[in-house]
Image (tube, helix red, strand yellow):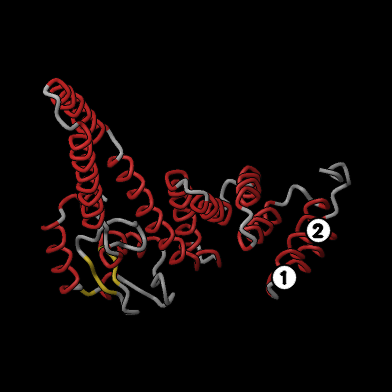
Amino acid sequence: MAGQDLPIDAGKAMECKEKGNKCFQAGNYTEAEILYTKAILHDPTNHILYTNRAMTSLKLSSWNSVINDSQHAISLHSHNMKGYYYLAQAQSALLDPRAALQNALKAHELCKEDLILGKKDGNSLSAITSLVLKLKRERWELMEQERRNGTLLDEVLKGMALRKEERLGEVRDQGGEVGKVETEYDEKIEDVKRVFELTGLKEYERRQVPSWIIDDITLEVMIDPVVTKSGCSYDRSSIEKHIQLKHDDPVSREPLESHDLRPNIRLREAAEEYLAENGWAATY
């Protein structure tokens, strides 16, 4: 990039960054991107400038630019929660849910740390949790699609094609109507494909984990949900661990101790009923 050999000028970089922030807040993302680029030219060592430009590229749907800037920001600062968060969003947009989920989980982990330390970035936990759940659904959908296109269906279709050719040979030998046999088997093959498709879709629908059963802190299924004074429910194990590290409510930041927790009986009963019908979700 032209200008990389310019001497670092953190002051000018911050000046361009602030102008870029104002453009971003005003919805002028193209100008914001230009200003963040100028800021980077003045100080290419500042990881925040790269995450700011990645954030702008998200708005412009420039997915590869988001990925490049996010990865560079992470290389400069490994505890870059926003870098992982933006990276995951871009990878999701490019239909790579496996890589996106891995980075979203890292962003979630770093965000929890920021929350415990009382940092501003900790306020993003809810949004990142939603992204993680979305990506888990996307990953599952991809796995289901791969399964539907997998070996079982292939073997069934190969067997039907073989039987079709055998039947056509028999009909030819008998001087029968070949076209009628071809039509019959083509229709059967299409019916089999539809059955596999419908089976796969129903299985996918059954394996959608509802958000109400997921703990916002651990992203795991709640087994023993309790409710805090702010009205939010968590699995007892995760909220107790949070209280040990930081004695406050994850949402309201009001003081919170173990004796303030109350069992969420209705949610627990609903979770138990759900797991009884969907045992696979226990290891979600």
State which quadrant residue 260 falls in.
Answer: bottom left
Identify the residue at horizontal 65%, vertical 44% (top origin). 72
Label 2 Cα neighbours within 10 Å, binned few <14 / some 14-19 / many ≥20:
many
Closest to the observer, 163 or 129: 163
Three-letter amino acid code of the residue under disc 2: Ala
Closest to the observer, 195 or 252: 195
Query: Which mark identifies residue 200?
Result: none
Q: CA distance from mark 2 to mark 1?
A: 19 Å
Which structural element holds mark 1? loop
| Residue furthest top as drawn | 173
Residue 266 image offset from top left, x and y in percent: 16, 74
Nearer-N-terminus badge (2/1): 2
Identify the residue at horizontal 68%, vertical 72% (top origin). 27
Identify the residue at horizontal 64%, vertical 54% (top origin). 62
Whether label 2 touches label 1, CB < 8 Å: no
Residue pointed to by mark 1: 28
Identify the residue at horizontal 74%, vertical 71% (top origin). 23
Closest to the observer, 95 or 237: 95
Closest to the observer, 157 or 226: 157
Residue 187 image offset from top left, x and y in percent: 21, 43
Is residue 171 depicted above or below 179 in this figure?
Answer: above
| Residue furthest right as drawn | 6
Left/right of residue 35 with respect to residue 239 in the rendered view: right
Three-letter amino acid code of the residue under disc 1: Asn
Residue pointed to by mark 2: 13
Residue 28 image offset from top left, x and y in percent: 72, 70
State which quadrant residue 29 falls in.
Answer: bottom right
Residue 209 image offset from top left, x and y in percent: 26, 59
